[in-house]
Image: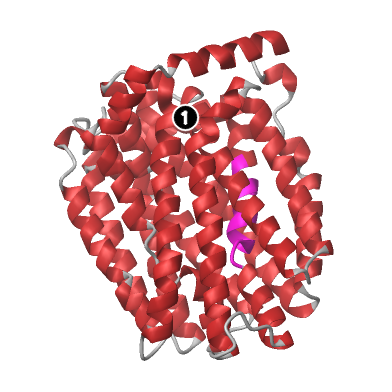
Amino acid sequence: MSTVDIAIGIEYHQLMNIQTKSAIIKDTQIKKFSAYGFLKNLTFFEPYLLVYLMGNGISLLEVGILISIKEIMVNVFEVPSGVIADYFGRKKELCTCFLFYIISFIFFSLSTSFLLAAVAMGFFGLGEAFRSGTHKAMIYTYIEKMNWENHKTYIYGRTRSFSQLGSAISAILGIFIIIYLPKSSYIFLVSIVPYIIDFILIATYPNYLDKSDICNTGIRSVSSMVKRSITNLKAKKRLRTLLYSNGVFESMISCTKDFIQPIFEFIIIGSGILVISSISSENNLKIILGISYFLIHILSALASRNSFRLRCFKTGYWWLNSLYLSLSIIFLLLSILINQVILVLVLFVLMYLLLNLRKPIYVDIIDYNMEKYERATILSFSSQLKSLFTIVMAPIIGYVAGTFGIMQAMMMISLIMLILTPFTIIKKSSWD
């Protein structure tokens, strides 16, 4: 079996011939997909969000509650948004999501209290719900139109790499923006600009990407489609396992990916470490966080762009399992090495690398395991499951981190992931 799997992987790699690869790179719509992700990730405030919120008197427990509020909004509107996208139009829904994001950024700039931050997170969650799954479905539709089905991992990895590149550039620009602006809160208003550009970009997508195959059916047919998707999901154990695995994997990262901010704040400001002695420790923290997020995202972009190469050596299912277990080990190591600045940065970089290596493989494999008509709906189910795990875990992790320490929170996450392996690891007998 392993020899056959390796042979299939080699054949997959050989299919990526120079001519096809060149066509994908030069394709105008692929460039638009990439630009969409690049602009969407120009959130200049990302490296400083937790520090900003905690500076306004919000505790780690309340941060966990804010994350849950966002995910509750995603959870409530995720599946309906997928159906709305398939029925009424994907372009309209994506444009709507950017309006929600912009409202969210305005409230974040005003969030001097937990209540205002909660409103901001609520609108951000609405934006996430209306965006998630929809753009992937548009990419799938375009890939089929161009007969590039064999290259899904490469294409999605490439477009995702531009998202990470946007995050990397955003982190560097964010350093100058947050240091030189009169108030830190203005960084949220600056982040509105690329979202307006992305709104305009979505409007230029071709109209055939706006509708799915069910666009001309009635409401009853849409309801029937959702029921059929749920029935298929119940019947397909492997598809359910894929959804569970991705839900746990991404939710744990979603809950903890920005914990590097309070960790570095405690170490840098508490110990008085200065990279540039002529400026304050607070500005030193901003510079270090900006550079750290730049390294995280630029390496993540490389990982995402090259994730398709992993399948030359092992099956996609093998990699999904291995990367899941690797993440649990990273959380264990974080709990042990929490006071070491360089090692903490390395481990957080590895966490992001695992996410960006795994995501394109997951997107390819889950597409193989579902029907075309149910794409946006199943992808919405996937995101909704991740939201459910996050809703439950975020306040718990925030409480443990705030009460007992971040080290204990990381240890707890590692143990939970290992305990859940019977439900998240795809057994060898179901790989075929």
Within 10 Å of the Cα at label 1, are there few (<14), some (14-19), or many (20+) other Cα atoms? Answer: many
Q: Position of residue 344 (x, y in %)?
A: 71, 63
Residue situated in front as seen by the camera: 294 or 32: 294
Q: Does residue 44 sit above or below 198 in this rendering? A: below
| Point 78% across, 72% down: residue | 339
**In the image, is residue 138 above or below residue 282?**
above
- What residue is disc 1 on? 153
Please report the residue visible at 30 percent of the width from the left and 42 percent of the height from the top. 33
Could you say whether the residue bearing mark 1 is in a helix, strand or loop? Answer: helix
Count of numbered badges drawn on the protein:
1
Identified at 51% across, 75% down, the residue is 48
Left or right relative to 133: residue 102: left
**Residue type highlighted by circle 1:** Thr
Rendering quarter of residue 171:
bottom left
Q: Is residue 270 among what the camera can see?
A: yes
Q: Quadrant of residue 354?
A: top right
Residue 152 x %, y %: 42, 27
Using the image as rendered, state which of residue 418 and residue 161 is in the foreground.
161
Above/below status of 148 relative to 322: above
Given residues 78 and 37, the one toward you in this image is 37
Quarter occupied by residue 209: top left
Residue 135 x %, y %:
34, 43
Residue 250 pos. (x, y %): 59, 49
Which quadrant: the N terminus?
Answer: top right
Give the residues in magenta.
246-258
Q: Do we see residue 66 in this rendering? A: no
- Dominant SS of magenta comes to helix
Q: Is residue 348 left or right of residue 160?
A: right
User: Residue at the location (81% across, 64% down)?
Assistant: 337
Q: Is residue 417 magenta?
A: no
